[in-house]
Amino acid sequence: MTRVTSTVGVIVNPLAGKDVRRLVTAASHTSDVAKVGIVRRLVEAALDAGASGVLVAADTNGIATRATDGITGAAVFDAGVSGSRDDSVAAARAFRDLGADVVAVLGGDGTCRDVARGWPGLPLIAISTGTNNVYPRHVDSTAAGWAAGLIAAGAVGLHEVATPTKRVAIEISSGDGPPLEDDALVELALLDTTTVGARAVLDAHHLRTVFAALARPTATGLSAVAGRLHPLDDEADGGVLVDLGEGGRNLRVPLTPGRSVVVGVRSVRRQDGGAPTTLRGPGVLCIDGERDRVLGPHDTVLAWVERTGPRRIDIDRALSIAAGAGLFDVPVVASAERAR
């Protein structure tokens, strides 16, 4: 695969922001039209900032095709489209192999996790268009495009504006064979049920444990349990472990947008970075807000927080550095030249 230089990659999940939670909660809806506009603004800004090209990964809804239509320097990159979460994994892996300088992602927590599976440690701008948006940020795509383009062009150093984020490393042992490895960017949770059912967790009835790398009191979703008990800045290492059930304090948390539930809390503690937490089946393992894997009665999960996640780009810092260096200045044209 031919490597590219000064290039921005874009991955958009056409399914993000459209799941069943819109039928039973007040979750916002991000339409394809809105995503086309977000991507188009990002592409044009990145090229204006100096990127030599922008590659937008193909998707089943044609968002990439519509967003790049008529823009010189932008193209659709087809890494294979199946309509599943594997599309995001494959696109990230392809952009890594191509040598893309920055990758911008449109989606929620699950999309960002999928992208990180394809390219661990990728230089990432994560734009919220999903349901649970704890990891990605609500950012203006024009500003995001400028930051991406400046970094791709080498005008702003990636090392100046990108910080490795946390992840929950997961090992699942079933007694036969080597452990299965997985990870989460936001939180890991255990439910005392034995069926995956609807992937989203809409109530707290079966919730047993939450182990969160990101614990913000402003969050919506399972990590909000940790965030409203023991807030932990993204910059702080380690995570927060919460055991739930009757017999302790009661806590009101928004598991879904606009709707709060009351959960019983038995204990909460700060978990140092690298310190392992053990969860045991039976139950269902939830990763970044979605039911992911059924655990048998003899299955064991070992989890810990480490700072080996994507390198998140600080857009404000990138543009501030550019402003301080005069990179937005336009040469003044002499009056004689203007008169021609």
Image (tube, rainbow, N blue to C red):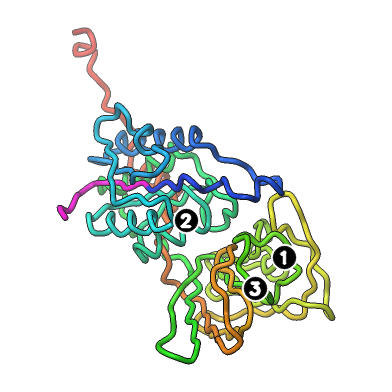
Please identify, in this view, whether the residue under mark 3 or under mark 1 is nearer the observer. 3
**For numbered disc 1, what is the local secondary structure?**
loop
Which region is colored magenta?
Answer: 1-10
In the depicted view, which residue is nearer to us: 314 or 278? 278
Q: Quadrant of residue 199?
A: bottom right
Q: Which of marks 3 and 2 is nearer the N terminus?
A: 2
Please identify, in this view, whether the residue under mark 2 or under mark 1 is nearer the observer. 2
Q: Earlier in the sequence, mark 3 or mark 1?
A: 3
The reply to whether callout 3 and callout 1 are in contact (CB within 8 Å) is no
* Residue at the spot of label 1: 228
* Residue at the spot of label 2: 111
Q: In which quarter of the image is the C terminus?
A: top left
Decide whether residue 245 is among the magenta residues.
no
* Amino acid tagged 1: Arg
- On the picture, is 250 further left or further right than 71? right
Q: Which of marks 2 and 1 is nearer the N terminus?
A: 2
Which percent across, then down, holds residue 193?
68, 74
Disc number for residue 307: none
* Residue at the spot of label 3: 210
> Badge 1 local density, few (<14 within 10 Å), some, or many (20+)?
some
Which residue is at the far left? 2
Which percent across, then down, holds residue 6?
23, 47
Which percent across, then down, holds residue 254?
72, 57
* Amino acid tagged 2: Thr
Query: Is residue 183 placed above or below 89 in the rendered structure?
Result: below
**For numbered disc 2, what is the local secondary structure?**
helix
